[in-house]
Amino acid sequence: MLGYVAIGLPCGILGNTIGLSPLQVALLSILLYSGAGQFMIPNMFLAGSGVAAITASVSLVNTRQMLYAASFAPQCADSPRWLSALFAASVTDESYGVNTARFAEGNWSVDRALMVNLFSQSSWTISNIVGCAVGAAVDIPVSIAAFAMTAIFICLLVTQKFTSANIVAMVVAMAGVYLCKALGLTGPAILIGAVAGVVCAMAFAVAAGKGGSHPAGFPPEGVEGAAGASPSEGAANAGVPAGASEGGEGR
């Protein structure tokens, strides 16, 4: 919970720079509840981005939270729908990590996991409100508060597995943003760079699969299973009759 204070305060300060009141910041934190998204909104607004570009960029960044929520489907199978829906809607990067570890340990329930989410959201909301009030009372350079957004994306980046496809996405996205800004397309730069990175990474993964190679971290099908299988199963995975394999070993 304390970790949200460090990034919630600058987020509230940035909200104040675009004219949001503490009440509006609170509603944004409760209804949207997206750290990266709430940093993107004022930054893109100050950069001159339109509503459509801001909405699309925030939506794209938040797609990861749908995957987080979907991964908890087995744990929510026996819970009431309203409880599962509220839990899924309040999952974030940090609470996902905590609850995943707790569910793996056992003796953890959806209602307890929901409490983790709600306490985290409360800490985030209060920090944003305080940050907005501080921003209105004290003149804080926007560049200092804005760097918190960069720090968040750095954290998201370094926690990813550095597979070949992810590296392609990272390089293409950075190049796309840089090129857009060099051409004067400051507003949609983040959106264009992100979409270009995702598309190129997917194309790379498909091409690597068709070529017989596999991105780092994804072994070819059958290799992993054959490594730990019995001689008969390993021979079957390799397309060799079981008897021939066992006979060869006998020799």
Image (cartoon, rainbow, N blue to C red):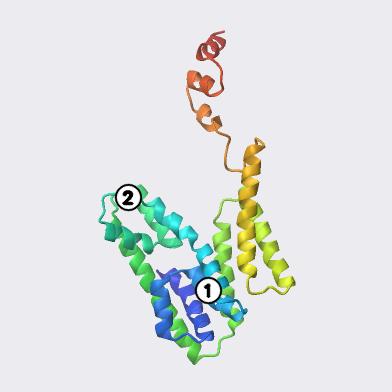
Residue type, numbered disc 2: Gln
Residue 7 seen by the camera: yes
Image quadrant containing the N terminus: bottom left
Q: For this view, does 168 lie left or right of residue 152?
A: right
Residue type, numbered disc 1: Phe
Q: For this view, does 162 lie left or right of residue 131?
A: right
Q: Who is closer to the viewer here, 74 or 231?
A: 74
Instruction: Please report the residue visible at 33 percent of the width from the left and 60 percent of the height from the top.
Output: 85
Instruction: Please report the residue visible at 49 percent of the width from the left and 63 percent of the height from the top.
Output: 62
Instruction: Please report the residue visible at 60 percent of the width from the left and 56 percent of the height from the top.
Output: 198
In the image, residue 129 above or below residue 212:
below
Image quarter of residue 207? top right
The image position of residue 41, as x and y in percent, is 53, 75
Find disc 1 in the rendering and name its residue: 39
| Residue most extreme to the bottom | 137
The image position of residue 227, as x and y in percent, is 53, 28
- State how far apart marks 2 and 1 are (Cα): 31 Å
**Mark 1 crowdedness (10 Å alpha carbons): few <14, some 14-19, many ≥20:** many
Residue 164 seen by the camera: no
Find disc 2 in the rendering and name its residue: 75
Instruction: Please report the residue visible at 39 percent of the width from the left and 78 percent of the height from the top.
Output: 27
Q: Who is closer to the viewer here, 106 or 12?
A: 12
Q: Who is closer to the viewer here, 18 or 114?
A: 18
Callout 2–callout 1 Cβ contact below 8 Å = no
